[in-house]
Image (cartoon, rainbow, N blue to C red):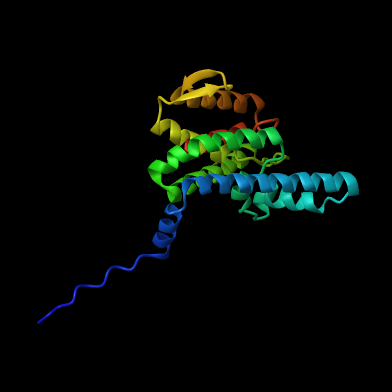
Amino acid sequence: PFTPPPPPPKRSWWTRFTRRLDQIPLLYVRIGIIAVNVLVFLLWRLGMQNYTRFRDDQPLRFLLENFATSWQNYKAGRWWTLLTSCFSQQQDMHLLVNCISLWFTADAVMSVIGVSRFMGVYLLGGAASSLVSILWRGDQPGYSVGASGAVYSCLSMFAFMYPRTQFLLFFILPVPAWLCLGGIFVWDSYEMLRKGRNITGSDNAGHLGGLLAG
């Protein structure tokens, strides 16, 4: 008797989702991530202008409670800030440097591991950066924002995949990717220990969390 072939196995929703992600053009992914960062940056600017002109702190309070990493947000159960803070910049130079770094490293990484895994690296690296920052600071006042941890996780993966690729340090001095990554690790470790649990300037603990996650 004729026996029909077994039906193909059903793919899980996660498998279908990741396959759809992997079909998105790499350029669109880079533009999309940068666009979200720019949008949140503009929200910060509007919130600050609203407070300066009208003394209305509601927009800023919303951003601090939903797009910044802090012990207060962690205690309040706003766990989503571990991720949303990775798309959040307040300074234009901070935004520019992160976007340039992402633009030149994301394509090379995505072409090897695919869009879905790249997004996993970016988001998990950002969350790890936020978590390390919170654990290092403890209940110290202050907050942290920025895509640096997520970008550093992508940079770390890039350096392991292409260790001899030349980076232009300060846009002038060519150095191999592995040396650039090592220098960043040493510098952030030194600054983290020097400043202790206080946040002044860069969140070095968050940077290290992103590097190690990548």
Instruction: Give the image quarter of residue 160.
Output: top left
Q: Is residue 59 left or right of residue 161?
A: right
Residue ranking furthest to the left: 1
Q: Residue at position x 56%, y 18% from top?
A: 172
Instruction: Name the residue rendered at 40%, 24% in the picture.
Output: 164
Pick the front one: 138 or 211: 211
Q: Position of residue 20 (x, y in %)?
A: 43, 58
Q: Position of residue 9 (x, y in %)?
A: 29, 68
Who is closer to the viewer here, 202 or 102?
102
Q: Residue at x 45, y 55 (%)?
A: 21
In this view, which residue lies farthest toward the right? Answer: 54
Q: Nearer the viewer, residue 185 or 153?
A: 153
Identify the image quadrant of the N terminus: bottom left
Q: Quadrant of residue 130?
A: top right
Does the image show residue 68? no
Q: Is residue 116 left or right of residue 38?
A: left
Q: Quadrant of residue 138?
A: top right
Residue 62 x/y as whole percent: 75, 53
Query: In the current view of this chain or complex, which residue is farthest to the bottom?
Result: 1
Q: Is residue 16 visible?
A: yes
For this orientation, the residue located farthest to the top is 173
Q: Is residue 60 left or right of residue 145?
A: right
Tally of marks: 0
Compared to residue 161, the image places residue 172 above or below, namely above
